[in-house]
Image (cartoon, helix red, strand yellow):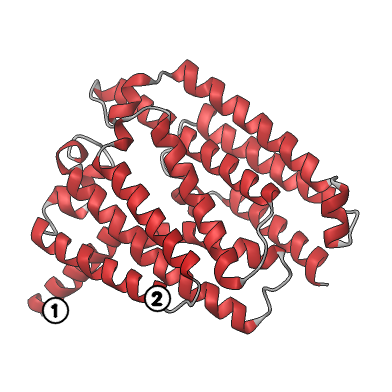
Amino acid sequence: MASISAKMISLRNVFNLLRIEHWIKNLFLFIPIFFAGEFLNADKLGQVAIAFFGFCCTASAIYILNDLMDVKSDRLHPEKSKRPIPLGLVSVSTAWVIFTILILVGVLVSFQFTRQSFIILLGSYFFLNVGYSLGLKRVPILEILIVSSGFVLRAVGGGLVADVDVSQWMLMMIFLLALFLALAKRRDDLLLFGKSSKSVRVASEHYNLEYINSLLIMVSGIIIVAYLMYVISPEVINRFHSKYLYITSIFVIAGMMRYLQITLVENKSGSPTKILYRDNFIRIVVMLWVITFYFIIYL
């Protein structure tokens, strides 16, 4: 019984190392096929699902590499110190083995697609994040832009494998949203730094609350204005054959207001993924936004 329990704990540690809960970020690959009206096309949906798995393996490999590079600083972080490598629950050598396996799986998945553009894109995503892990994350502003660009690459990848167009509007909105979430996370790092007097992220030493708060307000305003311009654009209205797109702006504004409340009032913006999983208001708003667009596009 003890050996079985140990194996279960070991497997749980590996799952924690992979950060499977963060795979939800890779759902951005499905955005282009959804808005292209091809979500019910089984062949294209299957292709995107395969690409999703490839991105998940690659992203988990990056998480492991980042943990390996930051193991000393992570031990000083109140949340990151609970990860398997800083706690010693997964050895460094085991982590490198898992990292290698994930990279190989990601490469094999990418070669399932005949379009070289996807292979190049997934490779670009990998090497961009390797650069981030090896030092670019220490460069203020640039590190936030790199994180945000990763979400744009996911959306472009989903469009490539499904062979659907990805509009400039879509890429702009995805980048702005990712930028907003990254800024909110940096604010949480600053709050932790203020409590512990130890920097939990090197680049955070070049930020302060006034600066991050200003950027959050600025970017949130840009997101809302850009979205309103999107839903009333004649080009977009003609593409979706609906003049009721503006209704969806209610959910975007409500979601932004709630996230700003979580960030600026409750000071709990540490993990966007956890917020999406745990905050009922955010979850309901996102679901209503998706459902509304589903009715507009597919019914």
Q: Earlier in the sequence, mark 1 or mark 2?
A: 1
Q: Position of residue 35 (x, y in %)?
A: 71, 63
What type is the residue that disc 1 sits on? Answer: Ile
The residue depicted at 11 percent of the width and 53 percent of the height is: 88
- In-front residue for pair 37/166: 166
Q: Residues within 10 Å of mark 1 (few under 14, many from 20)?
A: few
Q: Quadrant of residue 205?
A: top left
The residue depicted at 16 percent of the width and 60 percent of the height is: 95
The residue depicted at 55 percent of the width and 20 percent of the height is: 214
Residue 217 relative to residue 123: left or right: right
Q: Position of residue 291 (x, y in %)?
A: 73, 63
Using the image, tell me which numbered label, if any, was put on residue 4.
1
Using the image, tell me which numbered label, if any, was put on residue 111.
2
**Which quadrant is the C terminus positioned in?**
bottom right
- In-front residue for pair 158/224: 158
The residue depicted at 15 percent of the width and 74 percent of the height is: 7
Q: Residues within 10 Å of mark 2 (few under 14, many from 20)?
A: some
Question: Helix, strand or loop at disc 2?
Answer: loop
**Which quadrant is the N terminus positioned in?**
bottom left
What type is the residue that disc 2 sits on? Answer: Phe
